[in-house]
Image: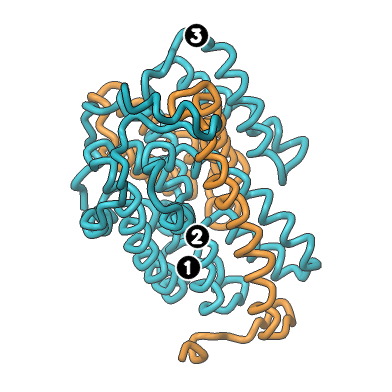
Chain colours: A orange, B cyan
Amino acid sequence: MTTDLVQPAAGSGMPEQLYWLAIPLAGVAATYVWRFLGVLFVARLDPHGAVLRWVRAVATALVAALVARMVLFPSGLLAETALAARLAGLAAGGLFWWLAGQRLAAAVGVAVLAFLLFQIALSA
Amino acid sequence: MAKRGDNAHGDPLRQEPEVVPPPAGYDWRWLGNGARHALSLPGLVMAMSFLGFGALVHSVHFPLAAAVFMDIFMWALPGQVVFVDVFTRGVPLLVAALAVTLTAVRLLPMVVLVLARARLPGAARWPEYLAAHFIAATLWVMSEMSMDRVPRAGRVPWIIGLGLSLMTGMALATIAGWHLTGLLPVSVAAALVFFTPAFFLLALADGARRLVDWLAIASGLVIGPLAHLVWPDGDLLIAGVVGGTFAFLLAGRQGRIRSLSGARGCARRDGEGQA
């Protein structure tokens, strides 16, 4: 029923059927295996123990690194924007969050707005 | 206390948890509460990213149906983007799988962290395997922000409800992004994508309560780009393990976490109830 949504893979010359083999193997299984291991591990961990504190630090550093990568080495649409605008957006959001009582939603809005304004100003 | 002794002659590896009454089961009435919680700041930010994903798959002539299939069965945006990228460039299946699985390693700590605060140790395990499928960076952040007010027995159902509802929204966002491509100016479309790094960084700062959190954020921001220059595909993994270990060791006994949930129980959250 979704066949009307499927477009031919013009760019790749890839046969249509290959997607339905590749995604379950290279996509779905390759992703879920780590979640599966997570469920196995969590049953053996002390929820208040040092291992979990370390895991939390790892996850925090990892997400911070993801932010740094998206801002410094972006792909796709962000790659077409100015580095200065991306940095200015984060700085404005962080500053607002720090000075204006740590309001998360408003700070995210300020960050995106500052990014947009700088981007428009720099590309004009 | 007296009951604890009854286990002494039993399986020595068996550790009875303190909080759970024997016939423990999940309270599925929290499914709907979780589902409604998708309408929040994190859900909105996530939708922006998936609009961007829809636009991306359109631009590389990747089938929309396959993209929506990935939303549902992969449910990990960085991995999906990597898959689209390597697959449309025609790399061998095994190489594509390796690239994707490298981005998915990060899901392990997130599943552990969310489920450590949600699971009932005595209960059936299949709901955990189902809930784990929905856990990624955004749901981890959302659980840190909002799961404290959900009773323990309702948490795994809450995650599943939230995940199902988010997933429906993100599939729709992918389809919308596919059709919106080209209608928006580049700067506006890029601003939608910029929601994601802005939200993640500010949410990490907002959730940071102890020295170790701040050290982990700082070391991830510094080590991540350095690692990217050395090994672009493994940068997050290096930054997470090296930076997280560094933060953990440096903070040392400074910040003994009483409980992952306790410390942030009464923290006020502005992200709630938005949108």
- Looking at the image, is mark 2 or mark 3 nearer the viewer? 3
Q: Residue at x 47, y 31 (%)?
A: B15
- The residue singled out by tag 3 in the image is B253
Read off the chain for label 3: B
**Is A80 placed above or below B232 here?**
below
- The residue singled out by tag 2 in the image is B75
Dot 1 or dot 3: first in sequence order is 1
Task: Give the crowd class for mark 1: few <14, some 14-19, many >=20 residues within 10 Å.
Answer: some
- Please state the horizontal and vertical placement of residue B96, each as a whole percent of the image: 73, 62
Q: Are marks 1 and 2 in contact (CB under 8 Å)?
A: yes
Q: Residue at x 47, y 40 (%)?
A: A85
Mark 2 → mark 3, Cα distance in angstroms: 36 Å
Task: Give the crowd class for mark 2: few <14, some 14-19, many >=20 residues within 10 Å.
Answer: many
Count of numbered tags: 3
Disc 2 residue type? Trp
Left or right: A71 as drawn, with respect to B35: right
Helix, strand or loop at label 2? It is loop
Disc 3 residue type? Arg
- Please state the horizontal and vertical placement of residue B127, each as a whole percent of the image: 41, 56
- The residue singled out by tag 1 in the image is B72
- Please state the horizontal and vertical placement of residue A102, each as a whole percent of the image: 27, 27
